[in-house]
Image (spheres, rainbow, N blue to C red):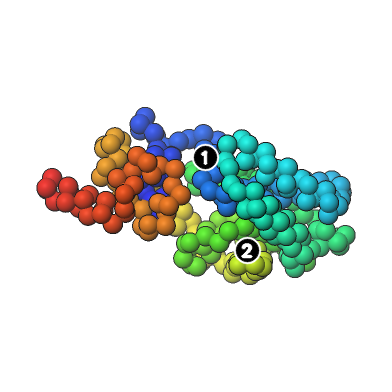
Amino acid sequence: MNACPRAWAITYATLSGHLNSSKAPPSTPPRTFDDLLTRTMRATWLKRLADQYQRKIWSIPYGKQTLENAVDDAMGLVNMSVPHLHLEMGKVRSNKQLRSLEQCQTLRPLFTGQPRRWAYFDRRTSANIGGVEVYAAPDVAIFHQHRWTLVRLQFRSPRRSLLGQQLEHLLMVHWAMNQPGFPRNFDAYRVRVVRWQGRAWQEHTVQVSNELLEQSLGLMNHDVQEMTWLQRWANADPSLNSLPLATHHEQCQSCRHRPDCPAKDGLNSAKRAQERTVLRTN
């Protein structure tokens, strides 16, 4: 929504006067090969966790073959084609990234037989927080030293500000406190982020406090208000021509809506044309 309000409105808003209210956010096809690899790694990792939870051990060859098959299936499903060398290099990089994820300090105990209570989640599992259906599930929750560590995995680093990211991560605590079986007091939680940065996974802890949790709820409610306003704006202008365009031209490069977007021939020129139209209207 923040990156490109127009693209968000096309994907999530409806002409019925309501936001898309399906139980899970709509799934869109991957726009690039890197996007496809990221989704495939996440799906493969979820299978890996499911088997590990059942104490089914993956050998290195089995893990490699599972990922490669998943990439091939995903390529065929969306009819994507890339040069063979590019494809093979992508598979090798993705396999190394998944293998190294198991060695992270936060996750290593799950794969080395160290005693832990833990659970894994699909991010499409929602929770009702203050009347809002929120998709903020942790990827993994690990109980250790009398507290739950909620783990968020980032296979690609987002562009949001550091503070915005931290507050967004804290929604995992709200999510957990609204789930059966988890404590309802915030001091029963730690928050860890495991993020792929360049060629390695980096780990950091997010501070959990009552003040920061209130700020994270404030951020969520602000975003909901912005979404509602944007949805009304889209209904008022079905052409969507008056809606704000992308904040940066990089957002346009792989956007699937670009062929029908005013910015298809350049973001800056499209914004200037939009400004001239607004001035004439006023």
Query: Which amino acid is tagged 1?
Result: Thr
Residue drawn at the location 57% of the way across and 41% of the way down: 80
Instruction: Find residue 65 and report its horizontal and vertical position in percent.
Output: 78, 47
Helix, strand or loop at label 2? It is strand
- The answer to which of 277 and 269 lies nearer the viewer is 269
Residue drawn at the location 66% of the way across and 68% of the way down: 200
Residue topped by disc 2: 196
- The answer to which of 199 and 215 lies nearer the viewer is 199
Residue drawn at the location 38% of the way across and 44% of the way down: 258
Residue topped by disc 1: 28
Instruction: Find residue 139 and report its horizontal and vertical position in percent.
Output: 67, 53
Instruction: Find residue 137 and report its horizontal and vertical position in percent.
Output: 62, 50
- The answer to which of 177 and 53 lies nearer the viewer is 53
Disc 1 crowd rating (10 Å Cα; few below 14, some 14-19, many 20+) is few
Q: 40 above or below 152?
A: above
Place residue 12 in its image quadrant.
top left
Query: Which amino acid is tagged 2?
Result: Trp
Helix, strand or loop at label 1? It is loop
Place residue 150 in its image quadrant.
bottom right
Place residue 208 in its image quadrant.
bottom right
Disc 2 crowd rating (10 Å Cα; few below 14, some 14-19, many 20+) is some
- The answer to which of 218 and 273 lies nearer the viewer is 273
How many callouts does the rendering have? 2
Q: Earlier in the sequence, mark 2 or mark 1?
A: 1
Left or right for 7, reference 118: left
C-alpha separation, residue under disc 2 versus residue under disc 1: 23 Å
Is residue 181 something that shows in the picture? no
Instruction: Find residue 77 and report its horizontal and vertical position in percent.
Output: 61, 35
Residue drawn at the location 43% of the way across and 52% of the way down: 253
